[in-house]
Amino acid sequence: MSQEVVPQAGASAQPKGLLQQMEELMAALNADLSQLDADLSGPRVGAAGGGADRAEVKADANADRG
């Protein structure tokens, strides 16, 4: 059950639209990664090992599942 891509009339306008979508997605991804980097590089709160921070992250992850 393979699907074939069949060029359609007016298909020359599609690549520009796809390119625009890809640029927007890449910009959003870069913004998300920059924010993640800032979050990870931020000051650490808690003990030297950061054990409390890890427990908080684990609790947050479990809360997101339920």
Image (cartoon, helix red, strand yellow):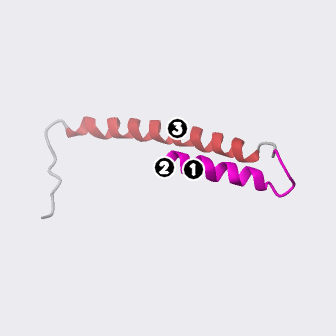
* Residue drawn at point x = 13 percent, y = 38 percent: 9
* Residue drawn at point x = 77 percent, y = 42 percent: 42
- Mark 2: give few (<14), some (14-19) or many (20+) Cα within 10 Å: few
Q: Main secondary structure of the magenta part?
A: helix
Nearer the observer, 40 or 60: 60
Relative side of 12 to 57, left or right: left
Local secondary structure at mark 1: helix
Dividing the picture into quadrants, the one containing residue 31 is top right
Q: Amino acid at mark 1?
A: Ala
Local secondary structure at mark 3: helix
- 2 or 3: mark nearer the eye: 2
Tell me the CA gap for discs 2 and 3: 28 Å
Residue 3 pos. (x, y %): 15, 58
Label of residue 27 in the image: 3
Q: Which residue is mark 2?
A: 65
Specify whether residue 54 is painted magenta: yes
Is the Cβ of the residue at disc 2 closer than 8 Å to that at disc 1? yes
Label of residue 61 in the image: 1
Span highlighted in magenta in the image: 45-66
- Mark 1: give few (<14), some (14-19) or many (20+) Cα within 10 Å: few
Label of residue 46 in the image: none
Residue 14 pos. (x, y %): 27, 38
- 1 or 3: mark nearer the eye: 1
Nearer the observer, 39 or 6: 39
Is the Cβ of the residue at disc 1 closer than 8 Å to that at disc 3? no
Q: Amino acid at mark 2?
A: Arg
Tell me the CA gap for discs 2 and 1: 7 Å
Local secondary structure at mark 2: helix
Q: Amino acid at mark 3?
A: Ala
